[in-house]
Image: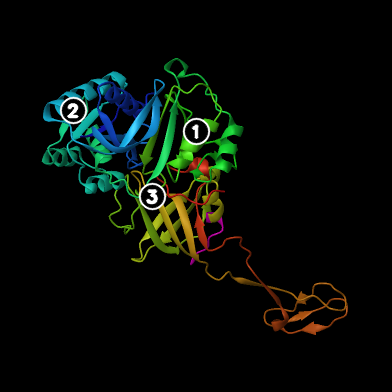
Amino acid sequence: MWIGIDDTDSPAGGCTTWVLSELLREARAVGIDLIGEPRLVRLNPNVPWKTRGNAALGARFGRGAGPRRRIGEIDGQPVWSHARGGPLGPAAADAWIDRAWRVVIRSSRVGAPGTDPALVASPRRLSASLYWAAVREVVPVERARTEVHARGATVRTLGDDRGIVGAAAAIAWAGAHPTWELLAYRSEDRIGRPRTVNAASVRRAARRQPGLFLCEDPRTRRLLVAPHTACPILFGLRGVSPEAPLRARPAIRSEPVDRWVLFRTNQGTGDHLVDRPFTGFAPYTAGRWRGTVGSVPEIRSGGHVAFSVVDQDGVAVPCIAFEPTKTLPRVARGLLPGDRIRVWGSRASDPTVRLEGLEILALAPRTARAHPPRCPSCGTSTGSLGRQRGYRCARCHRRWPPEAARREGTRTSLRVGSYHPTPSARRHLAPRGPEP
């Protein structure tokens, strides 16, 4: 039995991952097993009604079989993940759905503006096409509802039904090329107070476990493992394998950890990006484009840099590199018309692409500038005698033809290759670039 949940938090607090941990605790209490790893699935980051990271959660429950491994701890007791398992009986499945829904309602920010909890329970994983639509497009609620009903799924909602999309998409994700995140939670009485996470211990863990990523922004010295909102998360360790965060967790010095859970995620995968023509690029979606720089970059107020890219159909794509991404505006300032690049990013209601990264494919030749030659006798710079008339030394009166001019190309520090935002400005789904 797959359970997907979404829309349980609010901008003021709460966390859907914590609600899922409450489901894990309830399942353990009633003798229902977790099959596989719980899933933290990031969806289209551009939808205007998201709270924070636009994450939905999913997990599979049943009667566990085969090997098991520890993927969390709640109330001082281990949370086990079974490699495989069998289904719950019909009566047990119905009872579990009712119980799970009560847990979701009890654990959600019910009553807060924009908080409309949704639960989808399905006997089988939903079609992967629903996940790809939810991570790349704006999915109508009716499309998700049609999909879940066609698969015999049960739906529970409170308030707006939009959460059905995320809850169903969390079940639809196939779990391919994943990353992992271990989330440690604080006790409820500490929520809203400053977090205590020792930065030096995080840095040591990152050095000792190279499988961790996005632990710190070296440019700002800002820790990226701890959120800055009034939510129950204390810190999160992201890894390219499940072992890295599991090994690093005991080394993190912090305030007391109330519970922790390891999630399989789609973070750092770039799943929201797809090659597409600019024509038909819908609002609140993302994409990738190849083309040539079509205009001289314009530095705007605040340090943002705007320029255009002309795609293969001759359509000019307006782009902007925002200053907080640090790397991208620096690179954009050095671009010239004719440079061949690939860009990726997203748009809101207006057509401008907010850059999430760019790749320089080839640099156009920089214009060579002519400089008067220096006189070998005097060492002084010669003077021009006029257009195509050559040069003359004012001291010794020697002359040189026009071909004697020194030519220097316009200097640029740009190199062919990919450029990513500084770590603190990257989205959860953004493709993982090299660690600075």
Quadrant in the rendering for residue 191: top left
Q: Amino acid at mark 2?
A: Arg
Q: Which residues are magenta?
A: 332-339
Question: Visible in this render: residue 111?
Answer: no
Residue located beneath label 2 in the image: 156
The span from disc 3 to disc 1 (Cα, nearest Å) is: 26 Å
Q: Main secondary structure of the magenta part?
A: loop
In the shown orientation, is residue 19 left or right of residue 355?
Answer: left
Question: Visible in this render: residue 121?
Answer: yes
Q: Residue furthest top?
A: 189
Q: Residue at x 32, y 41 (%)?
A: 43
In the rendered image, the vertical position of residue 353 relative to residue 106, given as above or below: below
Q: Amino acid at mark 1?
A: Arg
Report the disc number at residue 249.
1
Q: Nearer the viewer, mark 3 or mark 1?
A: 1
Q: Residue furthest front?
A: 66
- Residue 405 in the image: state x and y as whole percent: 71, 78
In the rendered image, the vertical position of residue 271 relative to residue 393, given as above or below: above
The span from disc 2 to disc 1 (Cα, nearest Å) is: 35 Å
In the shown orientation, is residue 56 left or right of residue 320?
Answer: left
* Camera-side residue of 283 and 162: 162
Q: Residue at x 43, y 53 (%)?
A: 319
Quadrant in the rendering for residue 197: top right
In the shown orientation, is residue 228 left or right of residue 53?
Answer: right
Residue located beneath label 3 in the image: 270
